[in-house]
Structure formats: C-alpha cells, structure tokens
Amino acid sequence: MKINRNIKNCGFTLVETVIAMGIIAVMVTAFLAAFGPAVQGVRKSISYKEANRLSSSLEAELSVLRPGESQFTTAFEKAFTWIEGSVETAVGNDNMVLIYQYRGDPNNVREDGTLMPIAAGDNDIPGETFVIQSVVRRLGDPQVDEELIPRVVEGRVFYVRMTQLIFNDDGELEVSDQPGTIRGQRPPNTVSDHASYPDAVIAMQVEFFVMESSLVPYIRNTFDPDRPGKAVFTGNLAVRR
C-alpha cells in the first residue's frame, strides 16, 4: 500500500521576513542607544588628547628660536612671520605650517635640537633604537624632505592655519577679516612688521587639517591649502614678545 505524503515548502513567507527585519532593526537601535554615547565619548577623548598635543607643540615652537634660524632675530619675529604666512593659499608654498611625528635617532641630535630621522628596522626597540619626535615645520624647511618619507614619518600630517584675533567694537575678540595680515589691537591698526607691532601679545585662532597623504610629493604638488577640507580641531592660542 502506497502512502502519499504532502511535502510542504520550508521557505519564509513575506510577512515572516518583514517581521524578522523589524526585530533586527529594533535590536540595532537599542544597541546604538546603549553603546553609542560610550563610543562617542572615547572618540572625543582621543580627539581632545590629539588636539592638546598639537596645540602644545605649536605653542612651544612659536616661542623658541632654534639654532640655524638666522633669518629671524627673535622668537617673536619668527612667530609673527609664521602666522602671517600660514594662510597663503598657493599649492606647495614654502610657508605652509605642518605638524607631524617621525622616528628619530636618540643618539644623533641635529643643530636645531631635533633628532636625525631613522628608518624603521626589524629589530627596533622604542626608546632605545628610535624615539618618536613631534615637530612643527614649514614646508620650505630642508628637514621636511628628510622626515616625510616612508618608514620614517609616523602617523598623520596636519596642516596648520593661523588667523589673528582682533577686538571688535564691543570689546570682544573675533577672527580677523584679513587673514595673512597682523594688525595692532587699537587704532591706528596698521603694522608694517614685527618691530612696529604695538601690543605684547598676538592672539590667534588655530585650525588643524589632516592631509590625505604624509608624503612630500603630495604635499608639494597636490594638497590645496585653499580647500583643506574640514578642520579636525579649532582653538585659540597667543604668542608673547
């Protein structure tokens, strides 16, 4: 005797699929609500630490006159010149200010106090065979070509734009409408050079932009400082005489 068995398809119906998708969506939403703030908190913490390091490096560099910088008579003249030139928009202009890290040889110090760059090796020991050196350079500095090369440069390169802060009619500091020009805080505002600057402090807004590549050919020939993208950090600094 033959027994006929009805074989039923085991696939999901459209309604079942829609219900499953709805459940997954609810679970994803609940997950993001629970862990999203924690992830954002970590990102903010990392961004703050990075921005703090960058700001500290920039502030320190603008307050010191290194051996070999004979074109400046004082650290204030250097800072004045760097601030003015940092907003020049020509591609590959030598006055572009950069911040980055590279591998330095702790046993080989250059005239300007920074370490000679050293390429990564197979048996490297941090703190012994190499040290990570943070520096602020202008693109025209000769050291840039030695430091921004593969296996030497570490991490991202940041472009720095500095714009003076000027007191408005209400006595509040605001970003100058003349980037690349430094003026006195009180009328008459015209300043011809650092020597004629009448105030003790230059207040400025600093912006940090991440470059897509850390290599010199890209920075010199491709990166457009007139279209740097979105600033990863914006803050205020001041340099004194």
Image: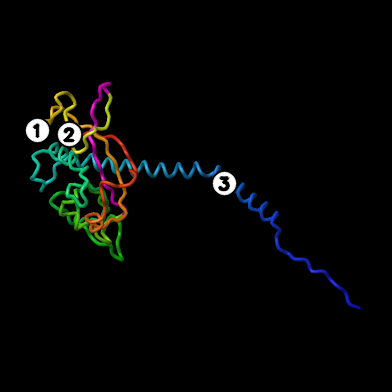
Residue located at (30% from left, 51% from top) = 211
Question: What amino acid type should be assigned to the residue bearing mark 2?
Answer: Ile
Residue wearing tag 2: 182
**Mark 3–mark 2 CB contact (< 8 Å):** no
The quarter of the picture where the N terminus appears is bottom right
> x, y (%) of residue 20?
66, 53
On residue 195, the disc is 1
Q: Main secondary structure of the magenta part?
A: strand
Helix, strand or loop at label 1? It is helix
In the rendered image, the quadrant that contains the C terminus is top left
Is 23 left, or right, of 74 in this rendering?
A: right
* Left or right of 185 on screen, residue 157: right
Image side of residue 28 versus residue 84, left or right: right
Tag 1: residue type? Ala
Start-end of magenta stretch: 155-171
Residue at image mark 3: 31
Residue 151: image x %, image y %?
A: 28, 61
Give amino acid for label 3.
Phe
In the image, residue 74 sits, relative to residue 17, either above or below, namely: above
Position in image of residue 32 (x %, y %) = 54, 45
Closest to the observer, 193 or 179: 179
1 vs 2, front mark = 2
